[in-house]
Image (cartoon, rainbow, N blue to C red):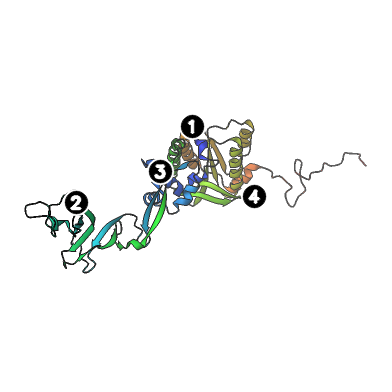
Amino acid sequence: MDCAEVQRLGESLAPYCDPGIRAVLAELLKAKSPLTARQIAERSGVGAVEEALSRLSGVVRVAGTSYGTVARSTGDTRFYVKLSCPFCGSQDLEREELVEHTGCGYVGRLSDFRAKDGSLRCPRCGSPVDGPSLRSIGFWYECNGCHQTFPRPNISLIGADSGSEVSPEQLEPVKEVSYALSEEAAPAVRELLGLLGRLEGVASSRGYAVSWRFRLTGKSGVLHEFCMGLDGGGSRVLVDLVICGDPPRVLRSVTKAFDASAELPVILLIAPEVEDAALRVLMSAAITGLRARIITSGDPSDLPALLERALADGFPSPSAGREAQGPQAGPSRGRAPGRGELGYKPPPAIGAA
């Protein structure tokens, strides 16, 4: 996974943990041409497509704009035209062209000008006529049901999807924007969606149900959001993911994991390896006794296997974590502070006044 490509996906990978956003991106990846929001919604089953697209600025681009019509009563955007007789409603109609003989001014149906021998003659003056002497002035309809003639039939529309009849007056103009994945972001999106799918598969294989974008208030009172919440066997584990994060982003994720681990076990997956020396010291020194497991790998594709191992190893209970931490900072209640604790005062030297 190329870090330069991953960084095009934005400051945080949290949006990509949203099932709706992943479904939208999956459809755009599969599409061979740009899709409208309506098409994305139909294919992905996501309702709030416009909201999802607004959170993918820089990853999804506007590919074009088209204009059409919609019947709000049925939701149809494609229609078949239905012509019917205004007198009896029959659709068994015939249409003929009305022409004028410019020589004498006679107006009639084109069939009236056709003689028995196949030539064209004016029914009024009998003169032979040809193309230049005939002027088209419109069309005339005849109903084969009631044999009425009329200049214009009733026009209605049949929704291609609903099969319902709608009138032209029920149509509303609509503007549809089509979207496509940015060519630069598409490779990283494909790899990230694949990685998230494999992580979900690992959790499911271990008997966990996955909740995406899980929120939890940490010990500090700050509300945190994690990529995954795993529930199984009466326990819950939080999983977060940092791919190609810079040191500040990694530090924020590590701090969040430590804060939330007071409430629930946390697995933080980081790739590639953290190179910042201070961060490495913090990550290794602060884990003891906490229910936070920070796992790093040089290759993001190794993270699913590392997650499976971490889930198999489990976590210490909260009480075991407190014992592992040793003496707590600050004096314990009910006794004087001891050496090395906050508030400790050494005894006076022998012979001091």
Give the amino acid type for the residue marked by disc 1 in the picture. Asp
Residue position marked by numbered label 3 in the rendering: 28
Q: Residues within 10 Å of mark 3 (few under 14, many from 20)?
A: many
Give the amino acid type for the residue marked by disc 4 in the picture. Ser
Decide which of 326, 241 is in the foreground and name it: 241
For residue 208, which numbered disc appears in the image?
A: none
Q: Nearer the viewer, mark 2 or mark 3?
A: 2
The spot of residue 321 in percent (x, y) is 60, 45
Decide which of 136, 85 is in the foreground and name it: 136
Q: Secondary structure at mark 3?
A: helix
Q: CA distance from mark 2 to mark 4?
A: 93 Å
Residue position marked by numbered label 4 in the rendering: 220
Residue under the point 77% across and 48% down: 336
Residue position marked by numbered label 1 in the rendering: 2
- The answer to whether residue 230 of the structure is visible from this angle is no
Q: Secondary structure at mark 1?
A: loop
The spot of residue 273 in percent (x, y) is 55, 32
Q: Secondary structure at mark 2?
A: helix
